[in-house]
Image (cartoon, grey):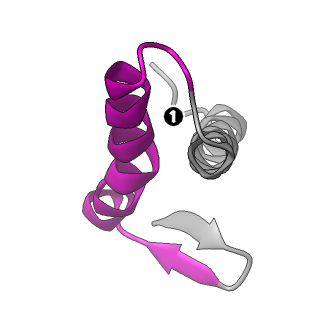
Amino acid sequence: MYKWNYNEEITADEFIRRLIPLVCEPVHTIWELEGDMFMSDFRKLSEASDKLSQVKRNLESNGKED
């Protein structure tokens, strides 16, 4: 299980499903705007980065990183 919010843990499949719109939509907009980005897209990418960093830290602390 992976932590999504402070009081919510989800499966890896659900984690990926929730992460996709935080990454794919902003990247698509960046492509459309030829490198420019909306602040809302920046927020989504920042949230995705935070969530991935937390999972990475948890994996490292549990010795599960390959």
Give the residue at x 38% y 63%. Answer: 18
For this orientation, the residue located farthest to the front is 33
Location of residue 17 with respect to 6 vertically, above or below: above
Residue 56 vs residue 33, the one in the foreground: 33
Q: Which residue corresponds to mark 1?
A: 64
Give the x, y percent position of residue 54. 69, 46
Give the x, y percent position of residue 6. 74, 77
Location of residue 45 with respect to 31 vertically, above or below: below
Give the residue at x 71% y 38%. Answer: 57
Location of residue 40 with respect to 14 vertically, above or below: above
Location of residue 5 with respect to 33 vertically, above or below: below
What amino acid is labelled 1 in the image? Lys
Residue 52 vs residue 1, the one in the foreground: 52
Highlighted magenta segment, given as a residue range: 8-36
Give the x, y percent position of residue 31. 34, 21
Residue 16 is one of the magenta-drawn residues? yes
Give the residue at x 67% y 37%. Answer: 53
Residue 57 vs residue 42, the one in the foreground: 42
